[in-house]
Image (cartoon, rainbow, N blue to C red):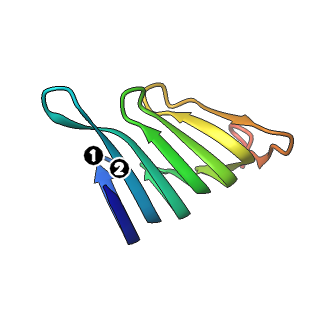
């Protein structure tokens, strides 16, 4: 299924917004979402965490979102920027990859 023009998808406390999305389904007895590929000004929010990028691929089975292209991840006062990073929705751990990874982080207990 292709959705275009200010797409806004919500699942529990996760929200994905983009200009265009392609939703892939699997038909193993019943239709289930397998993957969502979002492009164009992608914004993903979950609680106090915000991720932005050119492209996001949400793998439903693995519960992993991969952000690619001008990607940034903001949590509280911390920001991580990279060409590509992966968000594990189950563990809450994010990992950045690429030759240009940068960020600003607040020190714990610092005022």
- Location of residue 10 with respect to 59 vertically, above or below: below
Q: Which residue is drawn at 68% across and 38% down?
A: 109
Q: Nearer the viewer, residue 52 or 47?
A: 52
Residue 17 vs residue 53: left or right?
left
In the rendered view, would you say 107 is above or below 18?
Answer: above
Disc 1: CA contacts within 10 A as few (<14), some (14-19) or many (>=20) = few
**Residue 61, horizontal then vertical, whole percent:** 36, 28
Look at the image and tell me in which quarter the N terminus lies.
Answer: bottom left
For numbered disc 1, what is the local secondary structure? loop
Count the numbered circles shown.
2
Who's the residue at 69% across and 37% down the image?
108
How far across and how far down the image is residue 19, in percent?
Answer: 47, 69
What residue do we see at 69% from left, 53% from top? Answer: 69
Label placed on residue 12: 1
Residue 15 visible somewhere in the drawing:
no
Q: Which residue, given by chain and number where applicable, does mark 2 sit on?
A: 23
Above or below, 68 relative to 109: below
Decide if residue 106 is in sight here: yes
10 horizontally vs 103: left or right: left
The picture places residue 62, in percent across and down from the top left corner, at: 42, 26
């Amino acid at each position: 299924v292709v959705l275009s023009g200010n797409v806004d998808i919500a699942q529990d406390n996760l929200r994905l917004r983009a200009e265009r999305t392609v939703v892939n389904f699997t038909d193993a007895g019943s239709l289930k979402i397998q993957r969502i590929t979002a492009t164009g000004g992608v914004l993903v929010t979950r609680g106090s965490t915000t991720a932005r990028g050119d492209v996001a691929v949400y793998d439903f089975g693995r519960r992993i979102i991969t952000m690619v292209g001008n990607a940034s991840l903001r949590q509280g006062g911390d920001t991580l920027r990279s060409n590509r990073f992966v968000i594990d929705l189950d563990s809450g751990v994010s990992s950045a990859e690429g030759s240009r990874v940068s960020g600003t982080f607040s020190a714990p207990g610092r005022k």
